[in-house]
Image: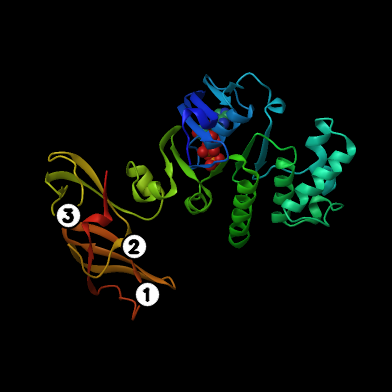
Amino acid sequence: MASSEGSAELSIEGVGKRFGDVVALDRVSLKVAQGELLTILGPSGSGKTTLLKVVAGFETPDGGTVKVGGTDISALPPAKRDIGMVFQNYALFPHLSVKTNVAFPLEMRNVAKPEIDRRVSEALAMVELVGYEARLPRQLSGGQQQRVALARAIVFNPRLLLLDEPFGALDRKLRETMQLEVRRLQRRLGLTTIFITHDQEEALVLSDRIAVMNKGTIQQIATTTEIYEHPANDFVADFVGESNIFHGTISASGTVALDGGGSVTVASDKPAGAKVGVLMRPERFGTAGTNLFNGEVIESVYLGTSFKLRLAVEGGRELLVRQPARGALPAAGSRVTVGIEPDAIHVF
Ligand code: ATP
């Protein structure tokens, strides 16, 4: 999806925020295109929530601007920003019915009563909660409560939707269902959305693009496949997916001499002498290949569709390998040979 200057719906430019000695945001810039779902993925404390609060207007940045549709909204109070929000623990009003909860943003905007009824019904239909209008939040499951929160966030047709770990408290199965529902709804309404998570699988399922954050800075912004296949650095490679990361020097065209000995053949046009990182995803290994590794199984786990093996290979290295589950699970102590092709290795 395009995210050029012209089509950027949300534009965050050089936003910084400190809390005492802690740099929560270090001049963060990013753009979100109209109708795009951008996930901000990062470990705890990386600055995700602070960034969202700056966009929503709950936190004043030390510097930088936030623009929506090209207009600087930095000086607007939260209620004037036209943003729908759902948080992990964004409690619904406990004493108000589902219907009254969802109607709230419309009441605040002095929308006429018949129009409120119409829009609340529409929003509840979208989150599949028709028939629950009269219930109180405590009479709903966690997933249903988050659906009400979602209905309340979209009922006034906001310009932006911000979701901060909205399914963090739900069990895995429900979480997966809700992810797909949010994605469908977001696409259908064409809502420009930022979704925060520390769960890489959730980010891969949901996003048009992912921004990976660490220590207040954006490490990489790219499509899901780009982030997984071509991570920009060690942090991204390690944080998204399982990985084997080694370091070395390009010694000749297509060869990396690994620090600590040994070499691998790669498909990279980086010049000789360049210091590089080498990423081999566990699932890219087979039983043969241009680069062969003989090793002893340290640990083996049966995962239904695959075997996950930890191998001790030459040069004191460990390799994590996934293979389709066929035949017997290799026992700890047994020796195996695995291989990987140059074009399955990412050099960064
Ligand atoms: P999590 O996934 O745990 O919610 P996060 O990536 O959302 O983490 P933030 O909540 O944005 O991270 O916090 C970024 C950093 O700023 C952290 O070191 C945090 O302790 C600090 N921080 C956030 N809010 C405040 C505050 N009000 N006062 C002081 N420090 C704060």
How far, Cα to Cα, is label 3 from label 1? 26 Å
Instruction: Judge from the rendering whether residue 270 lies leftward or rightward of residue 9; answer left or right.
Output: left
Amino acid tagged 3: Val
Determine which residue is flagged by label 2. 283
The first of marks 2 and 1 along the sequence is: 2
The reply to whether dot 3 and dot 1 touch (C-beta < 8 Å) is no
Residue at horizontal 74%, vertical 57%?
141
Residue at horizontal 63%, vertical 18%?
75
Q: Which residue ends up furthest to the left in the rendered image?
A: 252
Amino acid tagged 1: Ala
Q: Is residue 333 above or below residue 278?
A: below
Residue at horizontal 19%, vertical 52%?
266
Determine which residue is flagged by label 1. 325
Secondary structure under the numbered disc 2 in the rendered image:
helix
Q: Is residue 267 above or below residue 37?
A: below
Determine which residue is flagged by label 3. 264
Dot 2 alpha-carbon crowd within 10 angstroms: few under 14, some 14 to 19, many 20 or more: some
Residue at horizontal 65%, vertical 44%?
189
Secondary structure under the numbered disc 1 in the rendered image:
loop
- Residue 136: x and y in percent read 83, 51
